[in-house]
Amino acid sequence: MPLTPWIVALCMLIVAFLLYVNSKPDRGRFERSLLINAPAEKIFPLINDMAASLTWNPFVKKDPNIRGELSGPAAGVGARYAFVGNKDVGTGSVEITDSRASDYVHMHLLMQAPLAMEGNTTYLMKLISTVLNMDKMMAREFDAGLAALKQQVEA
């Protein structure tokens, strides 16, 4: 029994879609920014000090029962916060991996649940990001955090 043109066309569309998903970048990057009307010296301690960063962190505010543990130095490289939260927050850790006074803080966020998000983008994550706008989903939380930081610094 020969394949109908509709089945062939459908198979071709599925293959084209899967090839498109596979062509997405192997590494993901997400960043947000906001202008804060304050000197860097006033902002920096609220980012570089892990405990201070929890005062404006939107994920901590999202789960009042979050369980977290600070480790390493209080601030700067090696400062770490491991957390276990509800389904909206997840489980993971954030660690400061580089820091230059009043200039730069680089953090590594490792999410272990509900989705592991670290390193190279898996095919499954490429597929999910094709269907769901992950940037838009994450932007809401990161924008809320930046707004809380801005409000705290400018107050």
Image (tube, rainbow, N blue to C red):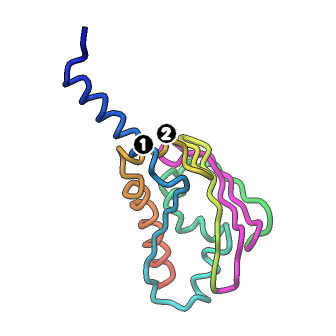
How packed mark 2 is, by other alpha carbons closer than 10 Å (few <14, some 14-19, many 20 or more), is few
Q: Find out whether the residues at labels 1 and 2 contact each other: C-beta distance under 8 Å.
A: yes
Callout 1, which amino acid? Answer: Ile
Callout 2, which amino acid? Answer: Leu
Q: Residue furthest right?
A: 72
| Residue 87 in the image: above or below residue 8 | below
| Residue 71 in the image: above or below residue 91 | below
Image quadrant in which you'd find residue 14 = top left
Q: Which residues are magenta?
A: 76-102
Residue name at image x 30 percent, y 33 percent: 12
Identify residue for label 2. Answer: 124
| Residue 135 in the image: above or below residue 3 | below
Q: Nearer the viewer, residue 150 or 25?
A: 25
Residue name at image x 19 percent, y 24 percent: 5
Identify residue for label 1. Answer: 128
Q: Secondary structure at mark 1?
A: helix
Give the image location of residue 104, x and y in percent.
63, 80
Tell me, yes or no, whether the highlighted magenta stretch contains residue 56. no
Image quadrant in which you'd find residue 8 = top left
Would residue 24 appear left or right of 53 to someone viewing this image? left
What is the spatial separation of the Cα atoms under label 1 and label 2, in whole angstroms? 6 Å
Tell me, yes or no, whether the highlighted magenta stretch contains residue 77. yes
Point out the image quarter for the N terminus: top left
Residue name at image x 66 percent, y 67 percent: 51
